[in-house]
């Protein structure tokens, strides 16, 4: 193999020493270069972690907000308010839309106050007279039936197995809960559910008699003695122990301005039965 003599193989007068020198000086040491590189890597990783944490925080905030909205909606939808009129008292209440409801003694009205603007729905157990402001559909739910109006006045009696609706103004739709029958009522018309659970229609009814309880007058036509005595219990907040013939019926009326013993005397004398006071609030009828 040929050997090369660097000094002899270059052209004359062009020795290696004659080439200009190359300055390869670095201002940083190797350790300093590595340190800077590691710092840049750390900063890069920290930025990535920051982005990830920000994304997690945003997702958590969105989920918490949605959960809060669901909770508020659930509360608004299902929170219920009930108003009860005790025995011996009538109450007048106003719903959120200023519709007026008069509750007879021992009656209960329930509704969802925070959801009422979305759905005007109330539940009634007892007797009440409604004067509903015009607007979207207004619905009264009871155990035996459902009444729907847009804006009108009507009376509902819903106690135990008895259910009747009387229209005073406007139009009222009544649907039986058990048989799903439907009837549209005009003023002075009534619908009631008979003992078999079927909806029946009365084309002409004495509306003054129906609403007489609002004036503390109570009118009965061929009513069972049990229902009459139950009404006396409700209006006077007394207890009546009944041991006479339960098939008796009563036709007549009385005013709440009369004391309870006078009312019992009026009813019992007309039917040939007797009553006696056991205490201030308890009576025996036999």
Image (cartoon, rainbow, N blue to C red):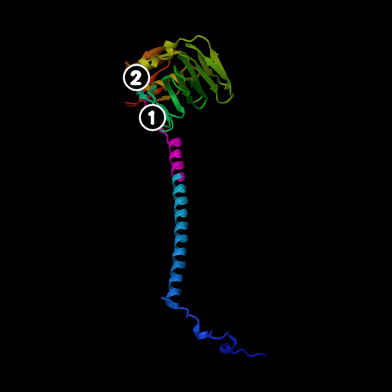
Q: Residue furthest right?
A: 1
What range of the chain is rendered magenta?
66-88
Tell me if residue 87 is in the magenta stretch: yes
Q: Which mark is residue 83?
A: 1
Percent x, y of residue 243: 45, 23
The residue where tag 2 is placed is: 260
Identity of the residue drawn at 50% across and 22% down: 147
In depth, the one of 252 and 190 nearer the eye is: 190
Q: Which part of the image, by quadrant, shows the N terminus?
A: bottom right
Q: What is the tally of numbered marks visible in this picture?
A: 2
Tell me if residue 47 is in the magenta stretch: no
Q: Which part of the image, by quadrant, shows the C terminus?
A: top left
Question: Could you classify mark 2 by the number of other residues whose Cα lies within 10 Å: few (under 14), some (14-19), or many (20 or more)?
Answer: some
Q: Which mark is residue 44?
A: none
In depth, the one of 98 and 29 nearer the eye is: 29
Q: Is residue 38 positioned above or below 120 on the image? A: below
The Cα atoms of the two marked residues, 1 and 2, are separated by 26 Å
Residue 74 can be seen in this image: yes
Percent x, y of residue 122: 45, 27
Camera-near label (1 vs 2) is 1
């Amino acid at each position: 193999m040929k050997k090369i003599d660097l000094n002899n193989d270059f052209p004359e007068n062009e020795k290696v020493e004659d080439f200009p020198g190359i300055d390869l000086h670095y201002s940083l040491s190797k350790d300093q270069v590595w340190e800077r590189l590691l710092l840049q890597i750390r900063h890069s990783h920290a930025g990535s972690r920051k982005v990830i944490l920000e994304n997690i925080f945003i997702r958590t905030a969105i989920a918490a907000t949605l959960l809060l909205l669901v909770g508020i909606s659930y509360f608004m939808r299902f929170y219920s308010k009930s108003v009860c009129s005790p025995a011996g008292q009538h109450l007048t209440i106003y719903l959120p839309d200023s519709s007026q409801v008069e509750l007879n003694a021992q009656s209960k009205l329930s509704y969802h106050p925070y959801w009422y603007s979305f759905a005007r729905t109330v539940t009634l157990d007892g007797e009440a007279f409604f004067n509903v402001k015009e607007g979207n559909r207004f619905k009264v739910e009871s155990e035996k039936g459902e009444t729907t109006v847009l804006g009108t006045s009507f009376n509902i009696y819903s106690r135990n197995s008895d259910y009747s609706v009387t229209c005073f103004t406007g139009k009222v739709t009544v649907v039986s809960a058990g048989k799903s029958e439907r009837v549209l009522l005009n003023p002075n018309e009534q619908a009631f559910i008979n003992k078999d659970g079927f909806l029946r229609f009365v084309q002409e009814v004495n509306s003054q008699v129906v609403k007489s309880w609002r004036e503390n007058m109570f009118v009965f036509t061929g009513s069972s003695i049990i229902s009459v005595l139950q009404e006396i219990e409700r209006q006077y907040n007394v207890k009546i122990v009944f041991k006479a013939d339960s098939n008796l019926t009563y036709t007549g009326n009385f005013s709440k301005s009369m004391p309870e013993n006078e009312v019992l005397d009026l009813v019992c004398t007309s039917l040939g039965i007797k009553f006696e006071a056991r205490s201030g609030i308890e009576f025996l009828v036999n």
